[in-house]
């Protein structure tokens, strides 16, 4: 029995160590990429991503390792009673900062989509820094001050077993901190992403109607019903993307904060047990939900910093010199630009590909290009511009008269979906 318990602790230690290491590596690479490459710092959104990565990095440095050691030690706190309060304060501060930054990013995306022409002028770096400072200040105020003044802890219970870090919260602080740290931010996020979906859905349908009105849906035997099917597929893909962004966050943190508010109201009243045994909820279940919430800091770099620009920066940081940071993808890919997030999909040559716009709306040539040509949006709401090809490539473009004029999708201050086709270049 003892051997099985020892093996279980070793397995738990390995898994938790892997989780901590993944959190540190993922968020460190995001921070290094933004600090190393100036073009990633030109967008205010990436400053939010940088600060988010720093808060998640703090979770991996200041919170997760100490709890992992405690789990392996069978629940015994080996770092002394004074450091227990500091660790609790770090836990509340870092977790709150991470959640508040996710809320800020959702607000930033909504502002960029709702009014793209004014966004670039209003969302300056100064405003971004002010929002970041506000998030960190609120996180510190709700953590260190109450914890070190002992406003957070439940009523002291005599006769507790030694070598335990009492993390129980009183009812007032548990509800107040949960509201500030989770329930209010998640409500804002749900509202913002719902508005983003509404605006994007309207824009997708406007694009589809413009295509049909311009006759683009009838080229190469394509019926109008196929254009409608494509529009519905894009809406489905958009809904899936937003569901993943919001669903991962809610699934990670909601169970923990539900228990966090429930625990202060279900004390068993026993006086001769450890703090972990003083509640009506199994401490192992509570610890699992706590680690699930911290795991959100491991997932955030994948969700919020995994677009094409970051991928190229990551390859450069990891030493892939044969794929330089500014080099295009070697294979043809299709990218749907949604509020600053670039999601890559394999380019389908099928006529009825649900993610592809009609080819006549994007490219005017029928032969492979000797060099790269792309149509890329500068930022959320900027007008689509064409990158000029070097004059040494006479076949790069046909005459300007043969180039089709892009449909005026950006006439309304709403989301602009665009498709970039990368061709193999010489």
Image: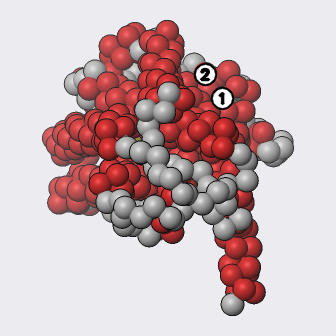
Of residues 388 and 208, the one drawn nearer to the viewer in this rendering: 208
Of residues 276 and 271, the one drawn nearer to the viewer in this rendering: 271
Q: Earlier in the sequence, mark 1 or mark 2?
A: 1
> Badge 1, how many Cα within 10 Å: few under 14, some, many 20+?
many
Point 40% across, 29% down: residue = 104
Q: Is residue 353 left or right of residue 321?
A: left
Point 36% across, 17% down: residue = 119
Residue 257 in the image: state x and y as whole percent: 37, 51
**Which quarter of the picture shows residue 72?**
bottom right
Point 23% across, 56% down: residue = 232
Residue 35 in the image: state x and y as whole percent: 70, 25
Q: Which mark is residue 209?
A: none
Residue 368 in the image: state x and y as whole percent: 59, 47
When the figure is inspected, residue 144 is found, relative to residue 90, above or below; the finding is above
Point 54% across, 50% down: residue = 166
Residue extending furthest bottom?
A: 1
Of residues 327 and 294, the one drawn nearer to the viewer in this rendering: 294
Residue extending furthest front?
A: 158
> Badge 2, how many Cα within 10 Å: few under 14, some, many 20+?
some
Placement of the C terminus among the 4 image quadrants: top right
**Which quarter of the picture shows residue 197?**
top left
**Residue denoted by label 2:** 41
Q: Secondary structure at mark 2?
A: helix
Placement of the N terminus among the 4 image quadrants: bottom right
Q: Are marks 1 and 2 in contact (CB under 8 Å)?
A: yes
- As measured in the structure, the alpha-carbon distance from the residue carrying label 1 to the one carrying label 2 is 6 Å
Decide if residue 297 is in sight here.
Answer: yes
Residue 177 in the image: state x and y as whole percent: 37, 37
Q: Which mark is residue 34?
A: 1
When the figure is inspected, residue 372 is found, relative to residue 286, above or below; the finding is above
């Amino acid at each position: 029995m003892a051997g099985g318990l020892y093996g279980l602790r070793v397995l738990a230690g390995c898994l938790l160590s892997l989780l901590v290491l993944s959190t540190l590596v993922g968020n460190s690479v995001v921070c290094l990429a933004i600090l190393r490459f100036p073009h990633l710092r030109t967008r205010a959104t990436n400053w939010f991503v940088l600060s988010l990565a720093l808060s998640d990095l703090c979770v991996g440095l200041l919170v997760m390792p100490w709890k992992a050691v405690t789990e392996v030690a069978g629940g015994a706190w080996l770092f002394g009673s004074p450091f227990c309060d500091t660790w609790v304060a770090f836990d509340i501060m870092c977790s709150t900062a991470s959640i508040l930054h996710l809320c800020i990013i959702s607000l930033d995306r909504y502002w960029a989509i709702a009014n793209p022409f004014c966004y670039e002028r209003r969302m300056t770096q100064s405003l971004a820094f002010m929002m970041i400072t506000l998030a960190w200040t609120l996180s510190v105020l709700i953590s260190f001050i109450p914890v070190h003044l002992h406003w957070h802890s439940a009523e002291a219970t005599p006769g507790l077993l030694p070598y335990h870090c009492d993390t129980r919260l009183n009812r007032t602080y548990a509800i107040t901190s949960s509201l500030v740290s989770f329930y209010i931010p998640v409500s804002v996020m749900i509202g913002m992403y719902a508005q983003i979906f509404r605006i994007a859905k309207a824009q997708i349908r406007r694009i589809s109607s413009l295509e049909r009105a311009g006759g683009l849906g009838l080229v190469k035997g394509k019926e109008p019903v196929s254009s409608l099917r494509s529009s519905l597929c894009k809406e489905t893909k958009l809904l899936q993307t937003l569901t993943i962004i919001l669903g991962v966050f809610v699934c990670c943190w909601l169970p923990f904060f539900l228990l966090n508010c429930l625990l202060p109201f279900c004390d068993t009243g026993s006086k001769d047990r450890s703090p972990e045994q003083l509640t009506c909820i199994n401490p192992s279940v509570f610890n699992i939900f706590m680690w699930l919430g911290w795991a959100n800091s491991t997932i955030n770099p994948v969700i919020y910093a995994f677009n094409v620009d970051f991928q190229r920066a990551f390859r450069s940081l990891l030493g892939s010199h044969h794929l330089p940071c500014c080099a295009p993808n070697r294979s043809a890919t299709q990218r749907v630009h949604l509020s600053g997030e670039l999601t890559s999909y394999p380019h389908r040559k099928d006529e009825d590909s649900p993610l592809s716009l009609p080819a006549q709306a994007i490219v005017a040539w029928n032969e492979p290009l000797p060099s790269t040509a792309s149509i890329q949006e500068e930022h959320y709401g900027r007008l689509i511009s064409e990158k000029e090809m070097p004059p040494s490539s006479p076949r790069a473009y046909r005459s300007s008269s043969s180039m089709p004029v892009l449909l005026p999708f950006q006439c309304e201050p709403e989301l602009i979906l665009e498709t970039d086709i990368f061709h193999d270049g010489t």
